[in-house]
Image (tube, helix red, strand yellow):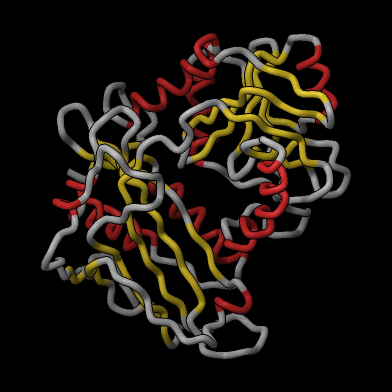
């Protein structure tokens, strides 16, 4: 069993791909750094941890993950500061959430101290892959999947845990058009909506594609029982500025506990902005939009941080919101969050873990 302080073996790549990579012109999630962390779970225990060159995986056609979707993942980022240091932002929250997802999906949890050490060592090794610029960061993708070669519905006995990174810039380059989804559902009470598992995202692809075919960038998901209450926006948590109050759906077991969501709520409270976490009805948002009381709305998540919503469609009616430059509350909260992550503002909550 892995214990605190066990050394992570590091095998450096013999040939870095960085010199042939144009970090100024990269598509989100398409370019990958030189190394990855790998650790296997066999016979009831985690094996030796190692960092090795990024490479393709070999997998049996009978691997359990390919048939029954026993897989989970996380997403977090590393940021370069103005003075050249590198920070991780709230990695302990992602570690804790991944272990909650593991428990829900009947998978082994990962020792938290080892998980954090792996993140630090991997980012330190590939820190030169972090692009320059205000929108730039190093996206970090930890994930775990079932490895048993077995065609039978049961939890796997073997797993592989991997972390890799990729240099990224802005996820969205413009404010997005969204529509309220009242036919298809992302999650149900008692389901896996609060877990970050692959099946949740696969199930949303078809309705999202239908929305995109109609000219929308994303959907606003509603509750699976009545479709009367707002839950998430695409793959992100969602916030509404109604009369200067920041309103977001309360966590009820079907909504992902977003790290960015939690950070925005805390920053808003620090800045004296009223925040309400509660049930948010579609009717309330529609009435507020119709009466001009819905000042702005945005999605919040690691990939995009804040994704401004340009308009919201309710059936055949679409309401346009304020121009992005006019959204003082959302822009201020987003700027404070970015300043903390990049070391331009004091970290009063202990959110930063320095790498180098």
Q: Quadrant of the C terminus?
A: top left
**190 is higher (above) or lower (below) than 234:** below
Q: Position of residue 293 (x, y in %)?
A: 73, 11
Viewer-proximal residue, 226 or 201?
Answer: 201
Q: Nearer the viewer, residue 304 or 4?
A: 304
Q: Residue at x 32, y 53 (%)?
A: 31
Q: Quadrant of residue 233?
A: top right
Pinpoint residue 39: horizontal percent, then vertical percent.
34, 73
Between 173 and 69, which is closer to the camera in this rendering?
A: 173
Q: Is residue 206 left or right of residue 130?
A: right
> Splitting the image into 4 quarters, where does residue 34 fall?
bottom left
Q: Residue at x 36, y 51 (%)?
A: 140
Q: Residue furthest left?
A: 14
Residue at left offset 45%, top offset 47%: 93
Please tell me whether residue 42 is drawn above or below residue 214 in the rendered image.
Answer: below
Q: Is residue 285 left or right of residue 341?
A: right
For image coordinates 59% across by 30% down, the residue present is: 176
Looking at the image, how many numbered discs can be counted on the residues?
Answer: 0
């Amino acid at each position: 069993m892995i214990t605190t302080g066990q050394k992570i073996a590091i095998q450096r790549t013999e040939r870095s791909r960085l010199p042939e990579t144009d970090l100024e012109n990269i598509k989100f999630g398409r370019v990958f750094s030189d190394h990855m962390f790998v650790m296997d779970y066999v016979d009831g225990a985690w094996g030796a941890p190692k960092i090795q060159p990024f490479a393709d995986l070999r997998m049996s056609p009978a691997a359990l993950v390919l048939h029954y979707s026993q897989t989970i993942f996380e997403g977090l980022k590393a940021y370069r500061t103005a003075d050249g240091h590198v920070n991780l932002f709230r990695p302990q929250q992602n570690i804790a959430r991944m272990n909650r997802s593991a428990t829900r999906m009947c998978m082994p949890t990962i020792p938290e101290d080892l998980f954090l050490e792996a993140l630090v060592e991997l980012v330190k090794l590939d820190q030169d892959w972090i692009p320059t610029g205000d929108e730039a960061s190093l996206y970090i993708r930890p994930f775990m999947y079932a490895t048993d070669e077995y065609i039978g519905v049961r939890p796997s006995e073997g797993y592989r845990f991997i972390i890799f990174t990729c240099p990224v810039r802005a996820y969205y380059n413009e404010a997005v058009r969204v529509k309220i989804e009242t036919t298809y559902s992302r999650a149900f009470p008692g389901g896996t909506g609060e877990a970050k598992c692959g099946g949740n995202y696969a199930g949303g692809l078809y309705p999202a594609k239908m929305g995109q075919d109609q000219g929308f960038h994303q959907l606003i998901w509603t509750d699976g029982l009545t479709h009367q209450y707002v839950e998430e926006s695409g793959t992100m948590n969602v916030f509404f500025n109604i009369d200067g109050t920041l309103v977001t759906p309360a966590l009820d077991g079907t909504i992902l506990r977003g790290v960015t969501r939690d950070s925005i709520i805390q920053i808003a409270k620090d800045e004296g902005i009223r925040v309400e976490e509660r049930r948010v009805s579609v009717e309330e948002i529609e009435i507020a939009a119709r009466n001009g009381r819905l000042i702005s709305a945005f999605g919040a998540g690691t990939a995009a941080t804040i994704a401004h919503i340009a308009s919201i469609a309710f059936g055949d009616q679409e309401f346009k919101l304020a121009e992005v430059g006019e959204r003082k509350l959302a822009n201020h909260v987003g700027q404070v969050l970015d300043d903390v992550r990049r070391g331009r503002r004091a970290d009063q909550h202990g959110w930063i873990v320095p790498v180098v």
